[in-house]
Amino acid sequence: MIRNIGIFAHIDAGKTTFVERILYETGELSSPGSVEEGTTEMDSLPEEISRGISITASTTQVKYKYKKETYLINLIDTPGHLDFYSQVDAALMAVDIAILLIDVTAGIRSQTELIANKISHLKIPILIFLNKIDRTHDIEILQKDLKRLFDFPSVKVYYFDEEDRLRYTLTEKEINEDLELSYIEWSEPLTDKYFKSKTPKKILLSGLKDGLIQKKLIPVFAGSGLYGEGVRELLDLICSLKTESEEKNFDAQLFKKQIHPYLGRISYLKLYSELKIGDFLYHNEVACPITKIICLIPGGVHELRSAEKNSIIVIPTPEGEESETWRIGDFFWLDPPLEDEDRKFSARLNYKREFAVALEPEKEEFRSELNHSLRDLVWEDPGLSHRIRSDTGQLELLGMGELHLDVSLKRLTSFIGEKFLKREIRVARYQIFTGEKEKVYWKHSANEGQFQSLGLTVSLLKSKSFENKVNFQTKISKSHMQSIESSVMEFLSHGPDGMAVYGVKLEVHSVEDFHSDPMHTLGLTKVAILQGLKSELDGNLKTIGPISLFEILVPFSSVGTVISILNKRKAKVIGMDVVNDRTRIHGEASAESLLGFFASLRNLTQGKGSLTLETHFNENKYSSLDEKESLLPG
């Protein structure tokens, strides 16, 4: 019996410590590891150990005994920082039950809401664990705040007795009606059954379990990952659930890739059918022979001859070009496609990467090695991409945030050493069209303007969104329409100032062609459009960039200094409130103005301040920037 559990939390909620306690409770560790000492099982990368944070989603399998049965629990530990949110998205593909960890001393953070919304959207059953209960029992306000997170009720499975000791309704024989009647309120048949039953406790617990699986309610535990309170009770509930394997029209899905220190390039799959050595998995109609099936366990690996449905396994990734085609979210089949069968091959994740850093090899002889290492880095991490800038020829690494890129550069250094030079991390800049031009005439002239060869009458309007559009009010050939549209989009992709331009709607009213050669006409059209756009956009563009919504948690003594620095960075503080012994500050600022702020905050607060940044860029959420310096073409 298999349980695939994902563990999710905001920054500093104690998630890694909680996972260590699970490994200890299941007998996998003789004692829990420590984040401070860098001895945890799941955070194994040097950057994770040195920073004390998770930067990748880690998976391991443990065995747990419940009522004489042995359960296989696949634990998926996810990063807490939003910079690594792509890892969270990918992990959710493999999760059957989500544990949302909340630090009772910090309350519900903006990131908590983001993750809760994502899990709810995917209709994954959720358990909440209020962590660090050893620090405070004053959590009734937090329990009330949980109600606004979800569309269905959160129900307590804990209480404090008269001596202020933590108790769990799951293990108590007596019924606490004030709490436990809420377990069956979602079901009228269960409610009727309860009042007629000779074993009412059993009905209540059945309502709790069925309600969880059917997404009718959310059980809420309180406990301590550090001291183990509530951890076994949580595992017992998970193992007691009557779960059914989800039916899919594919047999496996890829949710993680890794370059393992001993196994090389490996791929993590969630299975929806049994898989055996000797089988083939078909990916984009290419057959991949299964020569090895691996299960990752604490401290090592275990090879299998077969894996049952709902397992999480690891297989070697094919070598060569086929390896590069495997993407997070891709589907696999045990059978080749039938003739004319329409298969959807992927549920790939797409991200807009607004942060970039330019790289150069220290010596030209290192260029090939740098390119190869960048490909490895990007192959592993769905939140990264790389490219060569067309205007400068520089290599660029693009990511989801400043911390994400900083960590990635450290990892790149671990691959190849100090063989490359890096520029400062920068944030994308764009421009939006702010003017309108009705029926202007663009032409192409030859012989110093004496001979007109082509003319267009166009209107340049503001689009209601960031989307750029070309509409035709005249009949011309399909190839001519495609030439006009591609010329417009090509120019707007880098704009007159080296930044992508958004919000342009071009309407073509007429085209006058004074040339008999169609191919020549297409070339002249492109020149006329490029010249016309450059002229009309001049003085009608506004420079914009991503905006970051921030949430800062600092000691009372640091509030004044932090506010002062935020003002210098032109940040807008929207609100402040008190969370136990700290102040929480909400606000927004251009992502560009907050570069380097996290390091400053940690220094100012002697490491006691925390920062959550949620970066957006769309027609509703963006920041206006004054200068027109191009930092990163879109």
Image: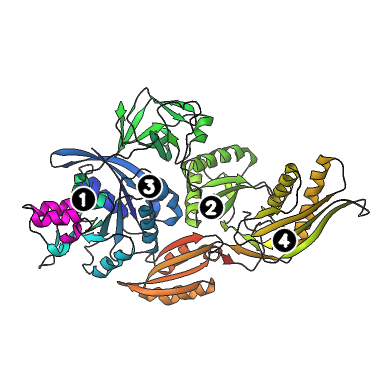
Q: Residue at x 13, y 53 (%)?
A: 193
Neighbour tally class for label 1: few under 14, some 14-19, many 20 plus, Cα within 10 Å = many
Give the camera-side residue of 346 and 552.
Answer: 346
Q: Residue at x 55, y 61 (%)?
A: 546
Asked whether, in this view, residue 389 is left or right of residue 34, the answer is right
Residue 496 visible here: yes
Q: Mark 4 — residue?
A: 460
Magenta part of the protein: which range? 180-208
Q: CA distance from mark 3 to mark 2?
A: 19 Å
In the rendered structure, which amino acid carries the disc numbered 4? Leu
Q: Secondary structure at mark 4?
A: strand
Q: Secondary structure at mark 3?
A: loop
Image quadrant for the N terminus?
top left
Q: Mark 1 — residue?
A: 209
In the rendered structure, which amino acid carries the disc numbered 2? Lys
Q: CA distance from mark 3 to mark 4?
A: 44 Å
Q: CA distance from mark 3 to mark 1?
A: 21 Å
Asked whether, in this view, residue 434 is left or right of residue 600, the answer is right
